[in-house]
Image (tube, rainbow, N blue to C red):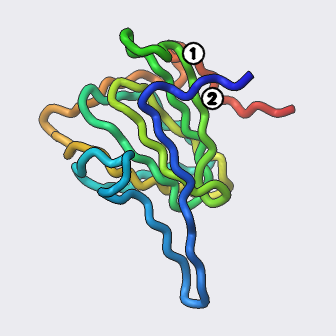
Amino acid sequence: MDKPIISGVRTKKLSVHCDERGRLMEMLRSDEEMFDNFGQCYLTTAYPGVVKAWHYHKFQDDHFVVVRGMMKIVLYDAREESETKGVVNEFFMGDFNPMILKIPAGVYHGFKCISEHEALVVNLPTNVYNHQDPDEIRLEPHSGEVPYDWSRKDG
């Protein structure tokens, strides 16, 4: 049986339009239900096999799109008031599965590059980053505080 999607998480498959000149892929539009507001846009990357985790934001939502490579993006709902408290979700995103993932405030998230080359993630958060007072709560990726094992699951 599949696990439920964490409350507030949204996904949308992205369409890639190709012709002899190249590709075009819309990521997030202001007229979509998934859009709340725009804070900033940034790019983050991971090298093959690298895990970047865990953190959550108190106030901002994130919108992840993997624009190169493949990432395993994992979410954990530790929100006390959430109907999906304790649920873990995995999303495999990137070259072979173009999609956008909305991660609501309060949900721990992290990612692991599962491609053979550096993977690139564009994030469109709802708030700007405050360097003096970051909206981030962090945990170590392998501490066990989040019930998830980052190792590959063969079989």
Q: Which residue is mark 1?
A: 147
Q: Residue furthest bottom?
A: 20
> Which residue is painted at 57% across and 69% down in the image?
16
58 relative to 48, above or below: above
> In the image, 130: left or right of 7?
left
Of residues 118 and 27, the one drawn nearer to the viewer in this rendering: 27
> What quarter of the picture does the C terminus occupy?
top right
In the rendered structure, which amino acid carries the disc numbered 2? Trp
126 relative to 98 in the view: left or right: left
| Left or right relative to 68: residue 3 | right
Image vertical order of residue 21 relative to residue 121, above or below: below
Mark 2 sits on what residue?
150
Secondary structure beneath disc 1?
loop
Secondary structure at numbered mark 2: loop
45 shown above or below 130: below
State the image coordinates of residue 84 (x, y, percent, origin top left). 49, 17
Name the residue: 49% across, 74% down.
24
Residue 70's spot in the image, x, y percent? 62, 52
Q: Amino acid at mark 1?
A: Pro
- Return the x and y of residue 41 as percentages of the image width and height: 30, 56
Work out whether 38 lies above or below 5. Answer: below
Badge 2, how many Cα within 10 Å: few under 14, some, many 20+?
A: some
Separation of marks 2 and 1 at Cα, in angstroms: 10 Å
Q: Residue furthest top?
A: 80
Q: Quadrant of residue 98?
A: bottom right
Outermost right residue? 155
Residue at 46% over, 14% down = 83
| Quadrant assignment for the N terminus | top right
Place of residue 78 in the rendered image (x, y in percent of width and height, measured from the top left)? 43, 15
